[in-house]
Structure formats: structure tokens, C-alpha cells
Image (spheres, coloured by chain):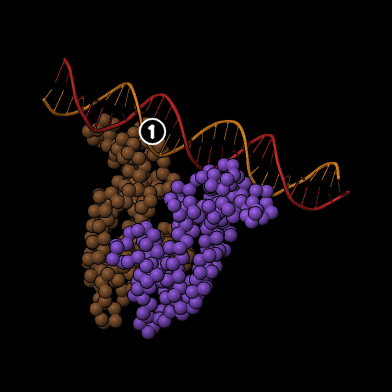
Chain colours: A brown, B purple, C red, D orange
DNA sequence: ATCCTATCTTGCCATTGACAAGATGGCATC
DNA sequence: GATGCCATCTTGTCAATGGCAAGATAGGAT
């Protein structure tokens, strides 16, 4: 009915990416198997190779998708740095598969022009939000340093949350916990 | 002469762990191959299984080693939180293989009692250092929140550094760059 | 109607992780 | 010193995987 969109067997490229997100969510990006994806999509084991070349190619496409999604998420969070930080963590939790791939460059072709461009777009949005941060100590803060500190704290919190490294007392609401932590930096 | 310590073929367990660190440093933990380790150590392809059971077993041993090493590194950095934070980042860079495994629980048996104990020891040292942090805004800061913020910022910076995600302008000295960023939190 | 190209399949090979069974050598015990 | 025992390591095997090559198929352009 609907999934067939004009290709030979349906919108296989998109189906494979969606399935990859699902599979990575179950077992992590390292355990991803192209043949498993093919089975889930109901195609032969070599079909993915045609669309992505190899596994790194598929993950490269996933990284591009992820950076674009992150940029959009940050934009929608508005101008406030605190809100953007919470959105960053929320993105990592809700789009765990994308996030885990994006920051593991040994898994894909990180120097791919499309990835670099998408990554740059997302970084630009984050920097814009930091520009609104009041300088610490009243003096003129170094915006580069402020951006790096903000990025580090949200990225670190997100990573630790995903790794399950945080103690139970932090609670089970990543947005609330993240807001609390980020306030330590921006207030 | 020296490597043989009383075993059948030498100190194979230690040799495999050392070789694993080397191999992970070259291609990351996901690409680690037990058979490659065996080849490098000059033993048969099934020898590693005897010492570690399977690949997860070897990485579990590596994680224990890593957490112990981290605890020791933080202890040697002294009481100062800034110094401990810089030491955390320095550890991640100098012991990249250990660090990458430690915070990727899907690769090993994170619920293993030895890992949990070692992880708890390292976390305890970090919490001790945070206890010395002056409360922000003059009021009594929540030590849990402060610890989480401190851990997040150093972990995030280390992770981004290792991922090669930071712009060139940050420089090539991780200790100096980390100190600069951490100051944003502790000053 | 024919060609053409993107899409997908079938077949194959080297590598890997894991398991089972066997060989080897040091060590304790008698 | 001989014997048995056990940790250590080897050999052999199997299923699964990634990747490559060659072929089949279908939908659209000419």
C-alpha cells in the first residue's frame, strides 16, 4: 500500500535508515549488522550495499540526519541558552541512536563534506545561543570559552546519562536533571 | 628472559590486556578482534578465551583496570577540584583505550561486581574533590548537583576532545584547554 | 518496441567469535 | 623419582558477518 513510493521494492534507503535507528537502539551502533537490517527490511543481504556502499556509508548518512535533526531541535528550543542545553540533552535521549553515531567518528566517514556541513550547521546554532549568555564576573567573558564550557557540560551530562553511569538519585527525568545541572553554569 | 613469569607461555593475561590497549588505540574498541590479539601475542586464536571467556570478559577486565587507574590518577592530582578536573581530562587522553571502554557499558559486563567496585572507588575520589568546591552565590550549594556539574563538564570536554569534535582554535594541549573551561565553572 | 540504468539478488570468500576436544607442561603428593 | 592432576594452550569446527562480483529485473526514456 503506502510504503512503495516509486522504487523497485519501496523506499528502501529510508527504510534501512529507519531500521538502523531501531537496531542501534536495541544493541548499540557497534553491534549493527547490515545483514540484519536487510532481513528486517525483507530484502537480500547485499541490497544495503547498493545504497550506502558499506556500513560506514550507512552510518555516515545517519550522522548527517542526526546533525540536521539536532540543529532543528536546538532552533525550536528558542533563544535561551538554558532551554537549548536542555534540548541538547533531550535530543540525545530521544534520538539516542543518532547521537551515539554522531560522536563516534571512527564508525563513519567524519570527513565527508555532507557530514561536516551538517555538523557545522548544528554547531552554529549552539554558538548563537551561547552568545546570549551574560558574561561571568561582570567582565567580558571569552565567548569561545563560554561556548566550549556550555557544550561540554551538556554533552557530558548527556553522555553519562546514556551510559547509565549516573547514580539513581539523579532521578529518571533527563530534562529536569539537566536543567538543574546547567543552571550551575548559567546562573 | 623476563616476560616469562611462571606460566606456561609467559604472562599471557597481562600481555593480552596490554596488546588490547594498543589495538584499541589504533582502531577503537568496536574493531577489537580477539584473534588479532592472539596473533600479536604469538599464541593460538583460542588462547584469549581461556583467560577472559569472551570478548566482553576481556573488556570487563580492561574496564576494571581503567577505573582503578582513574582513581589513582585523581588521587595524585591532589585536593584541588580544578586540578582533579584537569587530571580527569588528561587521563582520558593518555589512557584513551581504557576511557573509551569504561563508558561504553554495552561492550562489557558493567554489572560485574569488580567493575562496580572499581567504578565506585573512582567516583568516591571525584566526589571528595567536589566537596571542597565553594558554594555558588554564597548560599549552600547542593553538593550532589555540584558534583554532577563538575563531572559533566570534564567528561563532556574529554569526550568531545577524543571524538575530534572540537574546533582547531581550542589548541592542541588538552590540559591547558581543559583548565580554561573548568575555570568557567569553579571560579 | 527497444534500450538503459537504477535497483535488487545470488553466489562466493576471508575473517571473526565461540565452542568442543585434545595436547602440554608444571606442580603437588606419595 | 614416579604418578596423577590441573591450569594453560592448541587444533578443529561452525555459524554469522562484511564485502565483492556477476547476474536478474523492472521502470522509464527514446
Could you tell me residue B52's position as x and y percent? 59, 50
Residue at image location 65% in from the left, 48% down from the top? B9
Query: Which residue carries the number 1 mark?
Result: A45
Residue at image location 22% in from the left, 33% down from the top? A6
* Residue nearest the observer in this picture, D1 or A1: D1
The quadrant the C terminus of chain B occupies is bottom left
Residue at image location 62% in from the left, 46% down from the top? B50
Could you tell me residue A45's position as x and y percent? 38, 33
Asked whether the viewer can see residue A47, the reply is yes
Could you tell me residue B12's position as x and y percent? 61, 51
Could you tell me residue B103's position as x and y percent? 46, 58
Q: Quadrant of residue B185?
A: bottom left
Asked whether the viewer can see residue B103, the reply is no
Q: How packed is label 1: few (under 14 Cα within 10 Å), some, or many (20 or more)?
A: some
Whether residue B38 sits left or right of residue B86 in the image: it is: right
Q: Quadrant of residue A72?
A: bottom left
* Residue nearest the observer in this picture, B56 or D27: B56
The residue sitting at the bottom extreme is B138
Whether residue A4 sits left or right of residue B58 in the image: it is: left
Amino acid at each position: 500500500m503506502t510504503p512503495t513510493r516509486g522504487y523497485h521494492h519501496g523506499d528502501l534507503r529510508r527504510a534501512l535508515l529507519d531500521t538502523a535507528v531501531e537496531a542501534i537502539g536495541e544493541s548499540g551502533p557497534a553491534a549493527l549488522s547490515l545483514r540484519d537490517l536487510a532481513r528486517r527490511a525483507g530484502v537480500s543481504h547485499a541490497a544495503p550495499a547498493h545504497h550506502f556502499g558499506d556500513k560506514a556509508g550507512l552510518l555516515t548518512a545517519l550522522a548527517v540526519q542526526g546533525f540536521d535533526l539536532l540543529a532543528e531541535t536546538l532552533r525550536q528550543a528558542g533563544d535561551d541558552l538554558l532551554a537549548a542545553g536542555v534540548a541538547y540533552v533531550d535530543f540525545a535521549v530521544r534520538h539516542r541512536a543518532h547521537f551515539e553515531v554522531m560522536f563516534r567518528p571512527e564508525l563513519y566517514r567524519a570527513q565527508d563534506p555532507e557530514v561536516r556541513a551538517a555538523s557545522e550547521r548544528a554547531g552554529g546554532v549552539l554558538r548563537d545561543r551561547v552568545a546570549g549568555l551574560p558574561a561571568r564576573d561582570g567582565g567580558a567573558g571569552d565567548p569561545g570559552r563560554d561556548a566550549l564550557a556550555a557544550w561540554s557540560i551538556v554533552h557530558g551530562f548527556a553522555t553519562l546519562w546514556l551510559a547509565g553511569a549516573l547514580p539513581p538519585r539523579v532521578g529518571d527525568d533527563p530534562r529536569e536533571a539537566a536543567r538543574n545541572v546547567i543552571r550551575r553554569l548559567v546562573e
